[in-house]
Every structure is written in structure tokens, then in C-alpha cells.
Amino acid sequence: MTIQKKLASLKAIISGYGSCLVAFSGGQDSAFLLKICSMVLPKDKLLAVTAFSAAYPEIELQKAKALAEDIGARHKVIKTRELDNKNFISNSVKRCYFCKKELFTRLISIAGRNKLRFVLDAGNISDKNDYRPGNIAKRKLKIKSPLSEAGFNKVDIRKASRSLGLVTWNKPSLACLASRVPYGTKITAGLLKRIAGGEEYLTGLGFRQVRLRHYNGLCRIEVGKGDIRRLLNKREAITARLKTLGYNYITVDLEGYRTGSLNEVINQ
């Protein structure tokens, strides 16, 4: 199916909802979804909600606010408290389920108070290639995923976003900071802050797609395969900086960045 046909299908699906709340992280996928919703639905029938917590970098919150304003959608920021949930901080392989269950439950409540019929997330068919226990919560709570329903994958979303003039069309993938921590390692606010600081430093050096995977006193850096050589050329400065954050050993993943690399240890 062509992107044009997928777009037509997506617009028809969203139009059929009548009104909705969009779970809006400000990433490439949710930005595209919000943009299409804003093209189809009246402004008073659409609300974007961004959840902010220690697991979501402050800089991304500011970008999400600016993006929602640029799109012209109503926008609300809520504070979530994953770190108060023992099931989340214990960091089992079901961590994402507990996080999404809390988030979607709150979004459903907000949607109800605003007389909006459905809660939407930006899940798409590319997500099916990764381990995502949060999808269980999504199914149980009947969250809609119109991008997936219309057949959109990551490549489609990038191409369509570019044609719509969205600044997020080539934005690096976002993910909760907790996804940098191996299952079984307790998640704390201090740990998330350390990871965020390291990634912010690496991004400041010009690396677009970055993950700092945490292993107590050791960290594993993932960047795009084409950036590995440049990363190694800056190894002395990077090593010195990351050691100030408490890492004794700094390593580079020679396979480069890939979504959900910590899930590779799970026997799915």
C-alpha cells in the first residue's frame, strides 16, 4: 500500500473517533500522529498530553511543548510517579507494563473529564519487532493505535512527516531513560539523572542517536554505526567526562545503536 493510501486510511480512522486524547512524547511518531489528528479533528475535540517524570529528560519536555504549540494542538503536561511504584523500580522484565498501566489509566481519566472518546498512542507496526510488555496494558485498557491500524512503519512515518514539514521527520528515536538499565538493577532518580547527563554530553558532541547503557560502574555507549570511528577519536575526552559521573569503565558497542538492545538477553 502506498503512503498516500495509508494516509487516507489513517485520516478516516481518526475521523471516525470523533474526539481523542493523544499520548504525546514529542518524538517522531507521536508528533506525526498529533499532526494528522489536528488536520482531521476540531481543536476542541483533541488534546495532547505529555507525561513528565525523572525518566523523561527535561530538554525533551521543552521540545514537546514547543512542538504542540507549533502544531496548534491543545497541550497538557502531567507529572507521573513511576519511582513511587515498587514494581517499576525493581525493574523486572515487566517494568514497562507497570509504567504504561499507570500512564494509560491516568490518560483515560483525563479523556473522560474532557469528554474525549478515545486515548491514542503512536504505536506502529515496526514496534512489533521489539519486546514491549507495555502493549499488554494498552490492550487491556483499550488504547487505540491508529498508526499501526493504518499500516504505518517507521520509514513511512519519517517520509510522511517530512512531506508535512514536521521538524521531527528525522529526529532520533526516543525512549524512557529506564530502558538504559539492565533488568534486575534497581532504578533510582540519581541513576536516571546520571544517564541523562551522560547522554546530554554525548549529544552535545554532535552524536545524534545515543544510548548510554548502564552497568553499575561500567557503561556501554551506543551510537550510529557511522559514528563509531568519530566516537573513538574522542575517547579521551569522553572517558574523562563520564568518569566524573561515576563510571569506572567506559565501553563502546561495536554493533552500534539498535532499539531495545537490553532486550536481547531475554528468551522471548
Image (cartoon, grey):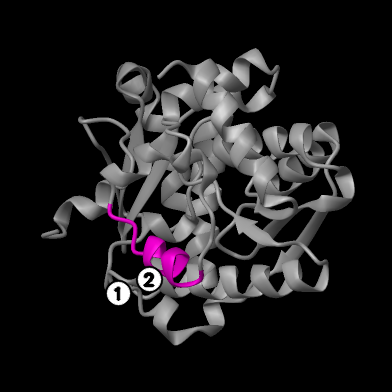
Q: Which residue corresponds to the image point at 51% horizontal and 66% vertical from the top-left? A: 142
Magenta stretch prevailing secondary structure: helix
Q: Which residue corresponds to the image point at 81% horizontal and 73% vertical from the top-left? A: 113
Relative side of 124 to 13, left or right:
left
Q: Which residues are magenta?
A: 131-141
**Residue, disc 1:** 92
Relative side of 77 to 124, left or right:
right
Q: Is residue 138 magenta?
A: yes
**Residue, disc 2:** 95
The answer to whether 4 is drawn above or below residue 73 in the figure is above
The answer to whether 142 is drawn above or below residue 35 in the figure is below
Do the residues bearing badges 1 and 2 touch, measured as CB atoms within 8 Å?
A: yes
Relative side of 179 to 32, left or right:
left
Closer to the camera in the image, 155 or 93: 155
Q: Is residue 2 visible?
A: yes
Q: Which residue corresponds to the image point at 76% horizontal and 62% vertical from the top-left? A: 116
Which numbered dot is residue 13?
none
Q: Which amino acid, by three-letter code, is at mark 1?
A: Ser
Can you say which quadrant of the picture contains the N terminus?
Answer: top left
Q: Which residue corresponds to the image point at 57% horizontal and 68% vertical from the top-left? A: 104
Q: Is residue 135 magenta?
A: yes
Disc 1 to disc 2, C-alpha distance: 5 Å
